[in-house]
Image (cartoon, rainbow, N blue to C red):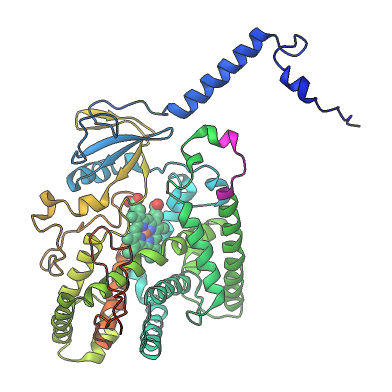
């Protein structure tokens, strides 16, 4: 049986270190010095030593942000940031397999099983990525058209019904893209924006995204914090968000199983993944990764196009684009509508979405990578275990790569230019976004159908103006305060 010990009195505690019966003053001093030394080391030392020939921020003066490459400390992590298009291509494409891992966020791996975007390329993750790439590949798109098309019809109808007064279209777009992802993964059909079920699922997903691959939690970078402060608020928030996410996905999965058991043929990714011989855990992990990544970037890009359309320049462009669409389909508006998800035949629209993704870089630093071995680059060695960050936003505006007009929005920039890497917004190399081509198609189709159905204009007084700044586009501009 355990015996209860009497707690030490305050006097006894104050005497701690003096009393020879507990610790001698010498030993006590040694313990304190050791503790301070450990604390100092933990908080000031990086796991990877400083890399020669790469300037460091912010101490190594003179420091110019114009450097192609610089290094910095993120707590105990040593990170190298690449700033120009050529440098990113040289490292992320030239050393694709050497940059295949991700820096680990502590406690995330245990909470989110098979977390594809945040995990090293282990064997199960390789299987999940391979399967995700297969189910998102072009040959399988025709089986998904019937899932994609109704969402855009619903968007158009809802805008027609509700869009007579001021309406923020962003939540609609995000919901549409999420619904698309959910029907792609689980064949689930949501009933619309007010669907409480998907709202709660999106909320849990956003909560997880908020912490993932970010610097929100200092304890991911300062090891001592992980010892000093245990079960942290943020960890609990991730855990509760994961619980919510799983609870709802279990419902969606059970519904799918029921339909399949009843003999219905449901063309969706879960059923496709069964063919890849993935375990049930891997199937769920892959689908979660797809759902997790889907809602924001695709919706934001369509939102940015709509914002730019509402400017005087954008309104003029819409007329040109509308004519171009009709021209491509011999004046047949219905045919253009029907083909929106099925092909990318309007070159000007293809160029428009590429330029949108380039100038308004919705993923400014992509997702961090980690070197799996020493990488020889530019006369130095970037050691194994270094965090690699691409400054995709700066590289997308690189005048050496794109010319003097790199910082201007030119919707026809990519007409006649079929480069396989028009921008870096989907990342690049071995862990490039597996949904890049499908996302392009979704943006293309949604914009095409919006242009066919509406003329987008800036609203009158009292409405919020579109912010088309190439860096601050996600900040809201204030309302025009004059009376309507
Ligand atoms: C415009 C829309 C999108 C943008 C800009 C975007 C961007 C990105 C970026 C920058 C990465 C990291 C790439 C790298 O490390 O090089 C990524 C990874 C990923 N994306 Fe996307 N994404 C978009 C849409 C989607 C959608 C709709 C899905 C799912 C249906 C998706 C699924 C994923 C997955 C699973 C990964 C992780 C891949 C891995 O780590 O191996 N993305 N995305």
When the figure is inspected, residue 247 is found, relative to residue 14, above or below; the finding is below
Residue at the right extreme of this rendering: 1
Residue at the front extreme of this rendering: 482
Q: Is residue 126 visible?
A: no
Residue 343 among those drawn in magenta: no
Q: Residue at x 49, y 45 (%)?
A: 217
When the figure is inspected, residue 237 is found, relative to residue 149, above or below; the finding is above
Residue 247: give x, y in percent of width and height. Answer: 62, 65
Comparing 296 with 449, the one in front is 296
Q: Residue at x 29, y 49 (%)?
A: 429
Residue 446: give x, y in percent of width and height. Answer: 31, 77
What are the residue bounds of the magenta stretch?
226-235
- In the picture, measured across the screen, residue 320 lies left or right of residue 363, that is left
Quarter of the rendered image showing ligand 1? bottom left
Residue 230 among those drawn in magenta: yes
Q: Is residue 101 visible?
A: yes
Query: What secondary structure is the magenta-colored segment mainly?
Result: helix
């Amino acid at each position: 049986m355990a015996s209860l010990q009497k707690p030490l009195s305050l006097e006894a505690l104050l005497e701690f270190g003096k009393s020879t019966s507990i610790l001698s003053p010498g030993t006590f001093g040694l313990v304190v010095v050791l503790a301070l030394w450990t604390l100092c080391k933990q908080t000031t030392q990086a796991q990877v030593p400083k890399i020669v020939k790469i300037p460091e921020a912010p101490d190594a003066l003179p420091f110019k942000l114009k450097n192609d490459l610089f290094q910095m400390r993120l707590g105990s992590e040593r990170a190298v940031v690449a700033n120009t298009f050529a440098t990113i291509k040289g490292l992320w494409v030239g050393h694709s397999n050497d940059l295949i891992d991700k820096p680990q966020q502590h406690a995330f791996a245990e909470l989110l099983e098979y977390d594809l975007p945040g995990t090293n390329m282990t064997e199960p993750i390789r299987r999940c990525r391979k399967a995700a790439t297969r189910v998102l590949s072009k040959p399988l798109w025709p089986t998904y058209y019937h899932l994609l098309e109704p969402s855009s019809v619903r968007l158009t109808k809802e805008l027609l019904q509700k869009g007579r007064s001021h309406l923020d279209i962003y939540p609609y777009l995000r919901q549409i893209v999420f619904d698309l992802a959910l029907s792609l993964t689980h064949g689930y059909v949501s009933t619309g924006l007010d669907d409480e079920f998907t709202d709660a699922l999106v909320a849990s997903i956003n909560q997880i995204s908020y912490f993932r691959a970010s610097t929100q939690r200092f304890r991911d970078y300062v090891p001592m914090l992980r010892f000093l402060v245990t079960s942290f608020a943020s960890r609990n928030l991730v855990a509760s968000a994961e619980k919510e996410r799983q609870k709802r996905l279990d419902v969606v999965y059970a519904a799918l199983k029921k339909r399949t058991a009843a003999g219905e043929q449901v063309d969706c990714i879960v059923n496709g993944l069964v063919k890849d011989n993935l375990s049930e855990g891997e199937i769920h992990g892959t689908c979660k990764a797809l759902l997790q990544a889907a809602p924001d970037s695709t919706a934001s890009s369509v939102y940015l196009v709509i914002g730019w359309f509402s400017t005087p320049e954008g309104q003029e462009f819409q007329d040109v684009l509308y004519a171009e669409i009709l021209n491509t389909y011999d004046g047949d508006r219905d045919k253009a509508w029907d083909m929106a998800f099925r092909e990318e035949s309007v070159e000007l629209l293809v160029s428009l979405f590429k330029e949108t993704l380039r100038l308004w870089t919705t993923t400014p630093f992509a997702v961090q990578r980690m070197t799996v071995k020493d990488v020889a680059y530019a006369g130095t060695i970037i050691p194994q275990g270094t965090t690699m960050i691409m400054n995709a936003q700066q590289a997308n505006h690189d005048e050496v790569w794109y010319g003097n007009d790199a910082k201007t929005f030119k919707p026809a920039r990519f007409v006649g230019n079929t480069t396989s890497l028009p921008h870096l917004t989907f990342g690049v190399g071995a862990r490039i976004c597996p949904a890049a081509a499908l996302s392009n198609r979704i943006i293309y189709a949604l914009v095409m159908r919006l242009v066919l159905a509406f003329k987008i204009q800036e609203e009158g007084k009292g409405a919020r103006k579109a912010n088309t700044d190439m860096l601050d586009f996600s900040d809201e501009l204030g309302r025009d305060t004059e009376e309507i």
